[in-house]
Image (cartoon, rainbow, N blue to C red):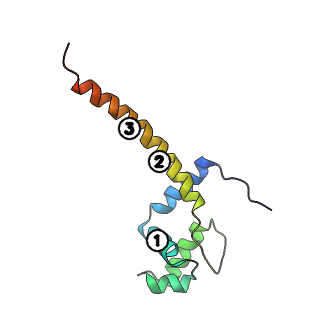
C-alpha cells in the first residue's frame, strides 16, 4: 500500500529540525555516502557512540525502531522545494531593489 504524500509544511519542519543538529547532519551525510547502515556501522565511521547514533536515528525515524537505516531523499526534496520558492521570491525583490537603486535620480 503506497504511503500518503506528506504535508509539505510538516516535511519541511521535520527536515529542518533534523538538520539543526550537527551529529544528525553527519549521520545523514554518512547514509547518503555509504548507503544503508546499522547504528554500529555509523558509530564506527563517526565520532559518536553507538548509543548516541541510536538516539539520533530514533529521532530521524520519527520514533520508529529499525535495525537498518537508509537515507530517504523525498523529505529533503520537499525542503529544497520550499527553499527554492523562498529564494525565488527574494531574488525577484532584490532584483527590483537593485534596479531602483541604480536608476539615475529624476
- Measured Cα–Cα span from mark 2 to mark 3: 12 Å
Q: Residue at x 77, y 60 (%)?
A: 2
Of label 2 and label 3, which has the lower sequence position?
2
In the picture of the structure, the residue carrying the numbered disc 3 is 91
Quarter holding the C terminus? top left
Number of residues whose C-alpha sits closer than 10 Å to that of mark 2, classed few (under 14), some (14–19) or many (20 or more): few
Position of residue 61 measured from the top left corner of the image (x, y, whole percent): 61, 68
Question: In which image quadrant can residue 45 be found?
Answer: bottom left
Instruction: Identify the secondary structure beneath mark 2.
Output: helix
Vertical order, 61 against 93 (above or below):
below
Is residue 11 found left or right of 85 in the rendered image?
Answer: right
- Measured Cα–Cα span from mark 3 to mark 1: 29 Å
Q: Using the image, tell me which numbered label, if any, was put on residue 83.
A: 2
Q: Nearer the viewer, mark 2 or mark 3?
A: 3
Vertical order, 94 against 15 (above or below):
above
In the picture of the structure, the residue carrying the numbered disc 1 is 29
Vertical order, 43 against 106 (above or below):
below
Amino acid at each position: 500500500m503506497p504511503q500518503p504524500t506528506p504535508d509539505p509544511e510538516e516535511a519541511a519542519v521535520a527536515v529542518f529540525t533534523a538538520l539543526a543538529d550537527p551529529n544528525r547532519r553527519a549521520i545523514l551525510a554518512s547514509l547518503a555516502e555509504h548507503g544503508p547502515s546499522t547504528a554500529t556501522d555509523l558509530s564506527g565511521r563517526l565520532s559518536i557512540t553507538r548509543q548516541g547514533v541510536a538516539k539520533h536515528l530514533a529521532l530521524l525515524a520519527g520514533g520508529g525502531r529499525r535495525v537498518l537505516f537508509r537515507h530517504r531523499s523525498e523529505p529533503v526534496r520537499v525542503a529544497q522545494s520550499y527553499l527554492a520558492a523562498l529564494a525565488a521570491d527574494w531574488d525577484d525583490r532584490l532584483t527590483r531593489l537593485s534596479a531602483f537603486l541604480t536608476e539615475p535620480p529624476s
